[in-house]
Amino acid sequence: MTEPIRSRSPQNPDDIVAERAPVSPDQVRQLAAGARAAQDEWRRAGATVRASALRRAAERLRDHADATADLVVREVGKPVTEARAEVGRAAAILDYYAQACFAATGELLAPSLPTNQAGLLYTERRPHGVAGLVTPWNFPLAIPLWKAAPALAAGNAVLLKPSPAALACGDEVHRLFHGLLPDGLLQVVPGGPETGRAVAAVSDVVSFTGSAAVGAEVAVAAARAGLPVQAEMGGQNAAVVLPDADLTATAAMLAHAAMGYAGQKCTATRRIIVVGDAAPFTEALVAAVAALPVGDPAQPGVAVGPVITAAARGRVLDAVDAARVAGGRILTGDASPDGGFFVAPVLLDRVDPGHPVAREETFGPLAVIFAVPDLPTAITLANSVRYGLVTSVHGHDVGMLLQAAQGVDTGLIRVNAPTTGVDFHAPFGGEKASSYGPREQGTAALDFYTSLRTVTFAAPPPPSP
């Protein structure tokens, strides 16, 4: 008998939030067949019907915003202020793609036809069919919806495989659409790696967010099958602090970007590169990190809750120990709260840039500070890792800010703004090992979830005289 999968509250691991039987590959194939049958009706339903369904799902989410935010806090340990913001953002994503149902699906071109023959040359986008979506636990509403909403808006069916750590939130996504879509069009399929592989295998287009190792596996499998695929993976994101940056404001911004939500964002700041004398900024950053409230994420004002599992906590502590043994200095990180998977935020310096803690993503409240003599050195260091998701640059000198923005090789560049934070109406994605395939979000998502074809429509030639 297959063991059930369970999601547990990371601040109270005895609290089992949800328990589900994993969906087997055979069951996934059956659900995909039903979704494919429902998709034919859905793609013919027209923009008005699809937009209405997405808009009503947004209204449902807003009607139950507080309870949904509480669920996010309980299941994944997200601080309540951030959980409420995620709910609001998820509703806005649904609104955006409801309106996007009416976006142009092609363009009219000048035909190349004989001068005596009328006709049209145009392009049109059509849904792929079944969209297989594999999503993580850290944004348990926003990420499933920023994938599912454009897929549905474009006329696709959806198979959503949520993280085992976010089972209840996956069910909440399903409830948002209950009764608004053709039966079987959107299916939530809980399970582990075997279920995820089955979802990718039966789909016509695949979108994944998670680790680089699994993302590479998904991308290879989809490419072999000839399927459109996108994989959003990790980041070892740098913040470059120029000599004229405001110490207090920038330190507070980077403390939250690095340690907020226990550093469990792919866009979190992992490396802080200070140009020039790093001592004043380091002092300000240590104070800002030490001031972050750590504790029960349900309490207003808490910025740093638990990490998601005991294994995640162990990885952070092991990384800190390895850095310390190699000569790194621990600047913050006092005793962590008891009773859950808590880790006090850790800021390190004197770490060799080649050490794994500086090069590989730990996915926890851990950041490393470096001092460099000039901006070219800072850019080289920022670019020295295999990831390329987002870089932030902080200062006032416009020339240096532009030089930094032009020099870093990341998909997102944020000037005087934190690495964290994503605009859902703009393309999202990274370079190098951070991303594979087309961008997510905005109108780029509508392009990804559709295939483009070119139609030459010629009128019958005039009759011969």
Image (tube, rainbow, N blue to C red):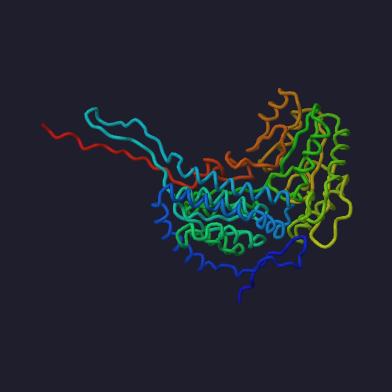
Q: Residue at x 73, y 56 (%)?
A: 77
Return the residue nearer the eye: 18 or 222. Answer: 18
- Asked which quadrant contains residue 403, the reply is top right
Q: Residue at x 83, y 32 (%)?
A: 247
Return the residue nearer the eye: 204 or 385. Answer: 204
Work out which residue is located at the far bottom of the displayed protein and give it: 1
Quick check: 420 left or right of 116? right
Rendered location of residue 146, percent (x, y): 57, 48
Q: Is residue 271 visible?
A: yes
The quadrant in which the N terminus is found is: bottom right
Quick check: 81 left or right of 91? right
Quick check: 433 left or right of 452? right
Quick check: 391 left or right of 357? left
Rendered location of residue 431, percent (x, y): 62, 40
Rendered location of residue 137, percent (x, y): 66, 56
Residue 159 vs 347, above or below: the answer is below
Q: Residue at x 51, y 48 (%)?
A: 150
Residue 179 vs 80, above or below: the answer is below
Q: Residue at x 56, y 63 (%)?
A: 189
Return the residue nearer the eye: 210 or 358. Answer: 210
Rendered location of residue 56, percent (x, y): 52, 52
